Amino acid sequence: MSTLAARAYLGFDFRLIFRDRLFLVFTLGIPALMYGFFGLMYGQSTYGEQAVSYYDEYTPSFIGLIMLNIALMNVGPVLVIFKEMGLFRRLLVTPLDMSAVWFAAVSRAFVLFGIGFIEMLLVGWFMFQRLPQAPALELLSAIVISAFALFSMGFLIGALFRTANAAFQAGAFLFQPMLLLSGASIPLEQLPAVVQKLALLIPMTHVVEALRLGWRGEFFSQAGLVPTLVLLSIGIGCALIARRAFRWSAA
């Protein structure tokens, strides 16, 4: 792979980040508004036997929703849009390979997530006058592993679909169960027992668990082992399948 070609593609990809303002509002603004709305209603509530506050329970959850939004509504659909534009077909004559495309897509997603993460911290500070107290390394590790899994899943969507409309529909279809059955918005304890078991099959459930553990400074404990292994398996599996399924043209 040519380093020059990879840099050129990465620069092109990054120039597109702020062009679609409606996407930025939807991806970064809606989770923050939901977080603030529910915070006004349940900000004084506590959860579980440890009486965890709304801030510590749901700030990481809504940060995870920003990550999910980026994976399903940006990473995958943008790849398909590039296919429809014929961009990848023209790149076939360059030394660029798919690893550079994956790196650019994930890097762009991390930049967007960084903006959303700061936004959520500001909203949390404004509402609760608090900041995360967890060791930075634990929280960062939980974020990176969760993002790797979700962004790889988004890349797989982009690899499988040939039209942007189909990719957006697939993302919207996956978003609903990820939101409702992962514990990100509704406590899992309030769901029927059979639904709680089904929730373990949803990647977002393990993302929420990992982020909450990282937020509380408990990610480097035995409790963090299962979500870490599950998310790493999902991320690696999606990346490998995407590499085999990826087509450089929408035709």
Image (cartoon, rainbow, N blue to C red):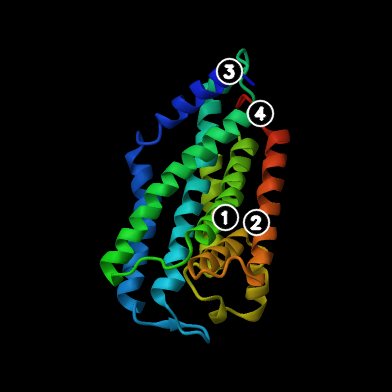
Q: Nearer the viewer, residue 4 or 40?
A: 4
* Residue 216: mark in rendering: none
Front residue (pair 28, 80): 28
* Earlier-in-chain disc, 1 versus 3: 3
Q: CA distance from mark 1 to mark 4?
A: 26 Å
Between disc 3 and disc 4, whose residue precedes? Answer: 3
Q: Earlier in the sequence, mark 1 or mark 4?
A: 1
Vertical arrangement, residue 216 with respect to residue 80, above or below: below
Q: Quadrant of residue 129?
A: bottom left
- Say which amino acid is labelled 2: Leu
CB contact under 8 Å: marks 2 and 4: no
Q: Amino acid at mark 1?
A: Ser
**Would you name the residue on which mark 4 appears?**
247
Residue 67 visible in the current orientation: yes
Numbered disc in front, either 3 or 4:
3
**What amino acid is labelled 4 in the image?**
Arg
Residue kind at label 3, given as amino acid type? Leu
- The answer to whether marks 1 and 2 mark residues whose Cβ atoms lie closer than 8 Å is yes
Vertical placement of residue 135 versus 115, above or below: below
Q: Which residue is mark 2?
A: 231
